[in-house]
Amino acid sequence: MIVDKKPLPEDPTPAEAPPSYEEHSQYVAFNKTEFQRDEKALPPPSSLPAAAIAGPSTTCGPRPSPRSLASSPPLSQKKFAKSPLYKWLPFGQAARAAQEVRQTVLSLLRDVVTVPDPQSALLLLQNCQETCAAHGLDFSLILQERSVERHTPIYWAIIKRPHEDANPSGIDLVKEILSMASPLSEDTISEIFLACLTNSDQKLFQRLRRTAAFAGLSGSDEMLLGGNVPPDDVLVEEVPSDHGAFVVHFCVVMFQKRMRISKRVSVEFIARGRMWRLQFAEFDAAHSSFDANYTKGTWLVELSLMEHSPPTYIDSHLLISDARFPPTSPSPYTAPPTNPAADTMSSMPGKLLLSPGTESRKPKPTIELRIKTSNSQQLVPQSRSISRHDQSFVDTLHVPLNKNPMGNSLQFDGCSYISPDGSLSGRLEARLAKPEAECIIC
């Protein structure tokens, strides 16, 4: 007697079984044919631009033209990645395919920072990003590898960045690469700063410092400012001089509140081939390395070099004027105004420039603090290790605000040196030379 077999109540057979051998073979043959068709569609090497075939890559064989790849999307790669058969391929085969794609992308990124046309470079960059996504590769990590002459593609994009006025296409390749490479590692940020310093690109450096990735806000700053980067303004003037003179104008918002809560406020800038940090800070245990007997809670002004900067002597003056009155005498290092309207305003009687209600008052004396190295010490970056017994280098110059009779008033509410909106404006006048006995600037 024949009895029909009933199915088990819990059948272990998966609902989605692997494809059959015949189906898998047909799919592989289809992709092989399509890949060959895509490869034949590429233009011959003789038709490529000279910039694209200047030389072979150091990481793989001859590269196709960046323009041709940028204009044709990787069809076979997309179909392969989207197909349900992709997940049933042997692990070794998928890994080899991803490794080949990675090496090709690394080679093409060299072309991205070589192609002179920003539009072609951007299309090639977008094509590489899509290809990596189709093969499960993290494109942001690939962009941060030192794959082009011991540096990242981001570094070379900044080094070769054209002047803003000389870029008619309006495409900012650096901005596009940074958006694709986010989040950035500390090593990548260091390389970006090095590129800005190499180019003395103060404008780009300040733009980067206004973004959250480069601002380096503390937790208390983020709570205080609501996660927004404070719009601190920094303007650098490099004055023609044999001693490397420069002037830095700065405006720090919410100065007193940030000092009381975060205990430090700093501005960073590039001047004379070096990266600087001017910082107001409250003396605490973090300043234990200072060879000075300050009382805890004393407000200091500090000047230091950031990484990648060469050592130097410096003699500088920090000047903070009464916020109720405009500066009455320009800095000797400041160029004369080129705007006729500015000339007219500067020649008008002083009482016409005063704030309302201050006609009968006189401005308080300017707060002036001298920040300098000694004749036997050079300033070096804080990242450099210095022995306590080495007296020829110093990594931070510091002066207490109360060294000037009016400097201590910056801590008090209603201080005349603080603007009504809470911002503090000042300027740093400096020259890179051994300090002299007399005042060298004023």
Image (cartoon, rainbow, N blue to C red):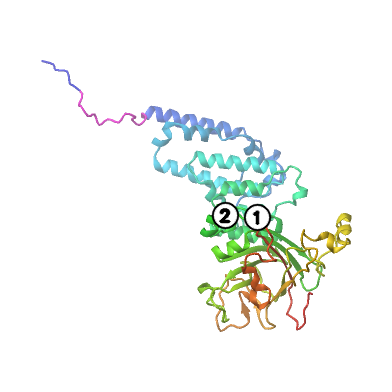
Q: Callout 1, which amino acid?
A: Pro
Name the quarter where the C terminus is drawn. bottom right
Task: State whether residue 92 appears in this view.
Answer: yes
Q: Which residues are magenta?
A: 7-20
Please report the residue visible at 61 percent of the width from the left and 73 percent of the height from the top.
300
Whether residue 17 appears in magenta in the rendering, the answer is yes
Q: Quadrant of residue 119?
A: top right
Percent x, y of residue 164: 74, 50
Residue 219 percent location from the top left of the image? 51, 58
User: Majority secondary structure of the magenta segment?
Assistant: loop
Foreground residue, 105 or 164?
A: 164
Residue 310 against residue 324 in the figure, above or below: below
The answer to which of 258 and 305 lies nearer the viewer is 258
Q: Residues within 10 Å of mark 2 (few under 14, many from 20)?
A: some
Give the x, y percent position of residue 341: 87, 54
Q: Quadrant of residue 243?
A: bottom right
Q: Is residue 23 magenta?
A: no
Name the residue rendered at 56%, 66% in the picture: 263
Eyeballing the image, is 421 above or below 78?
Answer: below
Name the side, left or right, on which 81 lies relative to 148.
left
Which residue in the protein does label 1 denote?
A: 231
Q: Amino acid at mark 2?
A: Leu
- Disc 2 secondary structure class: helix
Residue position for label 2: 225
Query: In the image, which is nearer the foreground, mark 2 or mark 1?
Result: 2
Residue 221 place in picture, x, y as percent: 55, 58
Identify the residue shown where x is 68% and y is 45%.
52
Work out whether residue 111 or residue 300 is closer to the camera in this orientation and state it: 300
Dot 1: element:
loop
Could you say which disc has been placed on residue 253 in the image?
A: none
